[in-house]
Structures are given as C-alpha cells and as structure tokens.
Amino acid sequence: MARHFLKLSDLSAVEARRIVARASELKCQPDRSYRPFVGRSLAMIFTKNSTRTRVSFEAGMARYGGHALFLSAGNTQIGRDEPIADTARVLSRMCDAIMIRNDSQADQSELAAHSRVPVINGLSDLHHPCQLLADLQCWTEHAGDPAGKLAAWIGDGNNVCHSWIEAAALFGFTLRIATPRGFEPDAELVRTAGTAIQICATPEAAVKGADLVITDTWTSMGQEAETQRRLTAFKAYHVNEALMACAKPNALFMHCLPAHRGEEVSAAVIDGPQSIVWDEAENRLWAQMALLEFLFFPS
Ligand code: CP
Ligand code: NVA
C-alpha cells in the first residue's frame, strides 16, 4: 500500500519533524551530484493555477535527477470527465508519484484509493499540507523550534488555515485564529486540534504577544464570484504595521503567496523587516524534496 500525503496529519509528529529537518539539510547541501530521483517521474495534475507549487516540484525533480510532468485539466482526459479512479490507475502504472491540485479533497482521496504510488496534495478546498512543511521549516530556521510558541492566523478560515491548525497540534504550538463571522475554519478540525487552537473575537486579541502573524488571500481560487462580499467582510482583518505592533517586537510575518498588498496585508508589512515570505516560498522546493525522499525511500 502506497503512503499518501493528503493532509498534514497523515504524518506523525516524529515524521513531520524529520521531513522539516531534512528539508533544511537539503537546503544547505550545494552538492548537485546528489541525484536520488534518477529514473523517477512525478505526475502533477493541476486544475487550478500555480506558480510556487508547480515550479518547486518541477525544479526540484530536475535538480535531484527525476522528471516532473505537468498535466492540466484542459490538455488531458481529466478535463473530459475520465473518472478520477481510472486516471489514478493509469498514472500510477507509469509514474512513481502523483501530485494533485484541485478543488476537492474527496476527489484526492478517490485518486489515492486507486493509486499504487504516493499521492500528494498540492492544494485542495480543505488543505495545503506541502505549504505547511515549508512554513514550519521557515519558522524553525528563523526562530527555532515552534513548540511552545504562539502564532496568530488573521483572515479567512480556509485551506491554508486548516493546515496550520493541524500543524499546531503536530508541532506543539498555539494557534490563535481571528476570522470574520461566517468565515471560520472547519469546526471538526478545530475540535480535533484541541487546546492548540484558540478562537479570538478580534485580530488584535489574536495577535497580542504572538511570535508569528500569518494571513492569506481573502478570496481563494474558485471564490472569485464572492470577491466584493469578501472585501467588505474582511476589511478589519488587514495585517498592517499597527496590528503587527500588538505582537512581540521580534514577531515574524508569513504568507503562503500570492499576496494582495492593500487587502489582507499592507506593503509595509509584507515588504518590511519582519516578513520572511521569500524564504517561505523558497522552502517549498526543499520541503517537497524532503517529502519525496520520505515517500520514495521509506525507512
Ligand atoms: N503558495 C502556493 O501554493 O503558491 P502557488 O499557488 O503559486 O502554487
Ligand atoms: N487559499 C489560497 C491559497 C493559494 C496558494 C487558495 O486556495 O487560492
């Protein structure tokens, strides 16, 4: 049975920490002769846009000797209603792993159920676990072990927020969440994470004394029709210098990107000294290669 990575909690705490630590090791190895993925192919299914996820997997596979195939819905039979189970059966006879970005966690589970090779979630409606491996690597590199620390999520209780919720439980930090009414994260995920999660009434309450402030776009891919309603609903959830001043003086700022300056974050914050978003983006490459090593070569 192949091991899949559809959500962060598919890993144990020990495994997640091992992958994050390995990602930092890979980052420090300039040695281009290390090519563990020679002869291996990664099929990448995208039904939504991507810059970081696509490029990090593709460049990483090339760097480590493997090959990545970009498969869009428009240019494959996926977009002509071939059943997802059949796609899984075929791709997993030809490739060594499958990465998928789509709008349905349920379809990803269906793909995994019929795949002989590991399936990796490159973003769904509910989770973004690859992002969190990179984020945990980044936070650790800048501030040490996240255990016992305090992070604040401001804005939409979306897919990225859900993966942060799972990360808090797995890595032992507290995540305070402030969202407008009607945009809360999944209640079951919050309940499962237990005391790691604190829901706050205002952004200021969430950020007070935090080591890290995190946000994401107010309108995720697929929600474009709601843009106007969201712009109004999220107005008070803008991360600016005044809000950052409520956090610890050395607090960091993270955002999975793409960002919208003037909406969820001000230019002064994302382009300022507390922001570590470019290291965060770079780490997508290292974290995902550490993940592939883990999936290809289980110890
Ligand atoms: N953060 C992230 O997943 O970026 P892309 O949408 O560019 O892949
Ligand atoms: N929440 C965003 C993340 C993009 C990487 C989206 O789903 O569009």
Image (tube, rainbow, N blue to C red):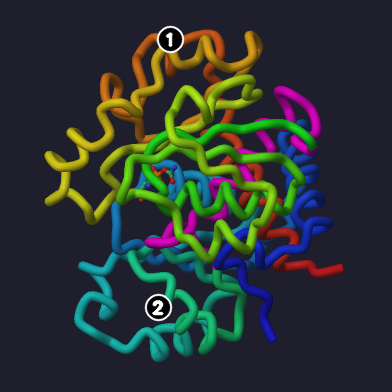
Compared with 25, 127 (above or below) is: below
Q: Residue at left 62%, top 24%?
A: 210
The amino acid type, in three-letter code, at marker 2 is Asp
User: Does residue 11 sit above or below 131 in this rendering?
Assistant: below
Q: Nearer the viewer, mark 2 or mark 1?
A: 1
**Residue 229 appears in the picture as rendered:** yes
Q: Could you tell me which residue is drawn at 44 percent across and 64 percent down?
A: 44
Does residue 56 lie above or below 258 as drawn?
A: below
* Whole-percent x, y for residue 126 in the image: 43, 61
The reply, left or right, for residue 40 in relation to residue 161 is right
* 10 Å crowding of disc 1: few (<14), some (14-19), many (20+): few
Q: Quadrant of the N terminus?
A: bottom right
Specify start and end residues of the magenta stretch as a single range.
120-147
Residue 242 numbered mark, or none: 1
Q: As drawn, is 10 to the left or to the right of 260?
A: right
Instruction: Confirm whether residue 29 shows in the render.
Output: no
In the foreground, 267 or 158: 158
In terms of depth relative to the viewer, which is nearer, 177 or 291?
A: 177
Q: Which residue is mark 2?
A: 107
Disc marking residue 257: none
Cα distance between the residues tagged 2 and 1: 42 Å
Q: Residues within 10 Å of mark 2 (few under 14, many from 20)?
A: some
When asked about the image quadrant of residue 103, the answer is bottom left
Looking at the image, which residue is at 57% across and 21% down?
Answer: 208
